[in-house]
Image (cartoon, grey):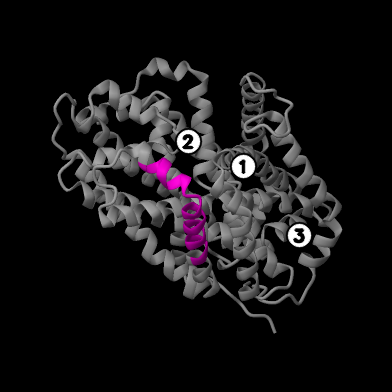
Amino acid sequence: MTKTESFTSRWALLIAALGMAVGTGNIWRFPRIVANNGGGAFLIPWLIFLFLWAIPLLMVEIAMGRHTRRGVVGAFGRLMGRQATWMGAFVGWCTMAITFYYSVVAGWCVKYLIAAVTGELSGVEGTAYWEGFQTTVWQPVFFHFVAMAACALILYRGVVAGIERASKVLIPALFVLLMVAAVRALTLPAAAGAEGPIAGLEFLFNPNWSDLLNYEIWLQALTQSAWSTGAGWGLMVTYAVYSHKKDDIVGTAMTIGLGNNSASMLAALAIIPTVFAVLPFAEAQAALTESGPASTGLSFIWVPTLFSEIIGGQFFMTLFFLALVVAAFSSMIAMLELGVRIFMDFGMTRQRAVLSIAMGSFVLGIPSAINLSFFSNQDAVWGIGLMVSGFFFAIAARKFGVAKFREELIAPSDNDIPVGRWFDFAIKVLMPLQFAVLIVWWLYQAATSGEAWWDPFGVFTLGTCLFQWGVVLLIFYLANNRMADATLGDGMADRPTLG
């Protein structure tokens, strides 16, 4: 007898899906990307690409997961034919490879939250504290373990008792924390020599229209929208396995996209006005644009310094890192569940799958915890690999027949917003075009970066991406039939049987 797991309601699916999308990238990465790409001008293409890339892909993922009732490996095999199972495996690997080092980031967040609560961060010099933390080696590994164990414990309890209940606490708490931090930032008095939070608002919302002629801003906006929403990761395929037959696909995708962007804006409102309230204009811009080791500059180096300068700084620093922890955990739960669902489709029980995925992810994340160059390499290789993953979903919809996909898998849902032929145009034309532009831009950057582009062991080279992608693709292609037999068969444990 099969055991059915499902979310208890559409609301439960929505809030879990928001947890999937809203992660540390919204708080840690988004304000820095805005600052480095024209401020207010960046927001215009960023919003446009939400509707041209992210939402159509999320709709494809949700429909695939609900229709096939398989994790990402089985979903490709069942929708496109067993010969395409390797494509789903590549998508799954991309996301799991990100999980290995994402857990390390979640561990950093836990460490800094504890340090903020205890007052250890008060009055410290950000760079010195960061370097001291990293040079201990054991601390990054230990907190990586703590983050992995906490998320595994939630998943071990199942969909309702674990994912759903955790999401109902984490996501409302996250939005409340971000709103409190944003209000506090907007009401800060200007420090000596600083222009104040209003200057931060002008920087964020007053676009220089000529910046829209800069193609790099459009490309950065596309990459941020593509990666921040979780579109093309396979995560919504996984969660949709536990959805109900008539759940609103269009509304769910819209809610995920708009909710994700709202969280990003709240984070920007919490950070950018604070920077301009504490620092003179030139220093504020430097703080916002500094990347730092492994792109840690703003959150882990500047934030402790900035919040130490304001009244009640320890309290609001604690709120900030608590929000980071919540965001990290909500996304990491979804990422680990992707692997768990794949293993369950292969015949494992949930408990055994959770233990296997968690232990394997912890071990494979240790190199990123102890070596920031390795961390940066994996971030580049598999972050860029998500472009390929997203394109695979567009290929799957085209293989099935885009119009047929829309009419049979999306339209019959109880959609509050009707899906029309704009979806067909987005999948057939816009998706391949955007993918081609991203790939060409990345190839150009990789070839002109100054590193030997062909080096398979470089940190950011074209060679290292092609080498690692090639190895993974070859392995999965050779194992295609075996994976198809395992995941497309009948009688697997814990296989959802919802209509």
Image height of 344 relative to 265, above or below: below
Q: Which residue is mark 1?
A: 378
Q: Amino acid at mark 2?
A: Pro
Q: Amino acid at mark 1?
A: Gln
| Quadrant in which the N terminus appears | bottom right
Q: Which residue is mark 2?
A: 293
Image height of 446 relative to 242, above or below: above
Name the spot of residue 331 as percent of width and height, x first.
49, 55
Name the spot of residue 51 as percent of width and height, x first.
50, 39
| Quadrant in which the C terminus appears | bottom right
| Res 78 label | 3
Compute the Cα span from label 3 to label 2. 42 Å
Whether residue 415 is visible: no
Mark 2 Cα-neighbour bin, 10 Å: few <14, some 14–19, many ≥20: some
Element on which disc 3 rests: helix
Please state which of residues 172 and 67 is positioned toward the viewer in this rendering: 172
| Res 55 label | none
Mark 3 Cα-neighbour bin, 10 Å: few <14, some 14–19, many ≥20: many
Residue 317 covered by magenta stretch: no
Residue at point 63%, 80% (across, down): 3
Residue at point 58%, 55% (across, down): 235
Tell me the mark number nearer the camera, choosing from 1 and 3.
1
Tell me the mark number nearer the camera, choosing from 1 and 2.
2
Compute the Cα span from label 1 to label 3. 30 Å
Tell me the mark number nearer the camera, choosing from 3 and 2.
2
Image height of 255 relative to 492, above or below: above
Disc on the earlier residue, 3 or 2: 3
Boundaries of the magenta span: 129-149
Q: In the rendered picture of this protein, how many numbered marks are placed on residues?
A: 3
The quadrant in which residue 362 appears is bottom right
